[in-house]
Amino acid sequence: MSDAARIEFDGVTKRYEGRGRDAVHELTLDIPAGTFCVLVGPSGGGKSTALKMVNRLIPFDGGDIRIDGRSVRSLSAVELRRGIGYVIQNIGLFPHMTVGDNVGTVPRLLGWKKQRIKQRTQELLELVGLEQDDAKRYPAELSGGQRQRVGLARALAADPPLLLMDEPFGALDPITRFRLQTELKRLHEEVSKTVIFVTHDVDEAIRMGDRIAILREGGILAQYDTPDAILEQPADEFVAQFIGEDRALRRLALKTLRDVKLTEPGSQEPGSRVSPDTTVRNAVSLMLDSGTPQVVVVDGDKELGVFRLEDAGALL
Amino acid sequence: MRRAGGPTVIPNFGHGSSCVTGDHAFCWDWVRGHWGDTLGPALVQHIELTAIAVGIGFGIAFLLGLATHRVSRIEQPVGIVSALLYTIPSIALFQLLVPFTGLTYTTIEIALVGYTLVILYPAVVAGLRSPSEDVLEAARGMGLTPLQILLRVELPLAVPVIVSGLRVAVVSTISIATIAAFVGPYGLGNPIFLALKEPTPFKTEIYSAGFLAVALALLCDAALLLLRRAVVPWAGKRFA
């Protein structure tokens, strides 16, 4: 597995002829290797533009973008793109190729041996949760969720150190989206790659991101930080409004009862029995629902401790 | 160019069967007796006329289509010229060409090729446009060169539309080629033309040649449909 790459946006500007303001304005971002970085913001914020400048599908007018210290302009566009995974909302699978051939696209371009491509394809299908038999099927035979899994496998095929994802789950139904979000998160922990992920959905940004960059209209960076830090201290009114007035609850959703300190359980504590994987937000919701200001955290038969409403307040 | 094979045969009323001499609606014995000297050769010529016209027409349409794909500005002028060509009645077009190329096989083929272009050129252009923007963006994003995109994505995806165009072109050329007999003694139009020249048009000859033209068109259409299924295994599959 190749290592993850560090990505630096250094004062990058993109201007379209005949438009009053920049699409992206002097964007500076340092994305450490292995980070899951989400670009989020309202439409017109230039987040997709910023993403597509990394693999030079859109040329930029000023500044520079570096991958592990090397400018993206130091390579030919074709060479650069073969080293970067790319996933888009409408996936863009090749309808005339089988799933297996779709996944093997970049390895074929790179001239891998047939046997190696076949082995890699099987590995990837398993990684993204598809069956080996699916390799022989055509994209038209798959569901939307399965297609996006193929899209992800295809992007990962040549094991790139960087993955660009442009609203990859935007066209999926909520249940499929949630499932794929969870799996992508797990996958990211497994394969250690830098991911730049564009979405307009704040919930998705908070759930997925190690770091979030919030862009406002005109392609101006409003805030770049961890989800927790942004929720705790929005940089300005725009950010506060964008992330919503329920940001305290959103922060609690970032932690599970495994992450917090519990009180020793007494005997016969009242309150709902919950698993340690419950988020603090859901625990609070349960307390309000049951009218008991505490929950008992249990792992199987074992009582781990008690979590109280005031403990939740103290976390904020 | 090949000349018409064998002498053209005008039915001999004196020695024919009573069916032929009485000019009944359809005489099997005449068809059997003249398959070898009239209908068979005319059918072979007809296939030849069509194959050459569609072959050359497809070659030109394909190159023009590729050029248009590169430089989309030329689409309108090329489209207008070929559409104008199509509005000229076939017989008139044959007559227009005669002063330049004479009463020859070449005249016929030039006209037929012109007609196939009207169908095949838009088919090639539309076919090359069939991949969606998402597919093209994914292809670019993965680092395919423009040539690789053309060869591996755009052309394979154009095949269904191009084959559909070929079906229309083949069927219409088979039909239009019967009129070629006005220029020279070629194809299935020739027996029809000659039978019409009789003092009383000889029905069996008209019907049998006409039937062969229709049968040939249907057969070619079915063959192209099967070809399309064979080379486009991905179309028609649906998620169930």
Image (cartoon, rainbow, N blue to C red):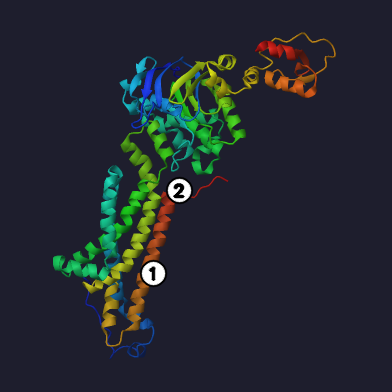
User: Which residue is disc 1 drawn over?
Assistant: B215
Identified by mark 2, the residue type is Pro
Residue A25 or residue A296, whichever sits in front: A25
Is residue B27 in view from this perspective? Answer: yes
Identified by mark 1, the residue type is Ala
Instruction: Find residue B6 and report its image quarter.
Output: bottom left
Residue at horizontal 26 percent and vertical 80 percent from the top = B194
User: Which residue is disc 2 drawn over?
Assistant: B233
Q: Picture coordinates of residue B103 (x, y %)?
A: 17, 70
Disc sitting over residue A223 in the figure: none
- Secondary element type, mark 1: helix
Q: Chain of mark 2?
A: B
Q: Picture coordinates of residue B77 (x, y %)?
A: 26, 52
Q: Chain of mark 1?
A: B
Instruction: Find residue B203 and report its image quarter.
Output: bottom left
Instruction: Tell me how many marks there are.
Output: 2
Question: Which quadrant does the C terminus of chain A fall into?
Answer: top right
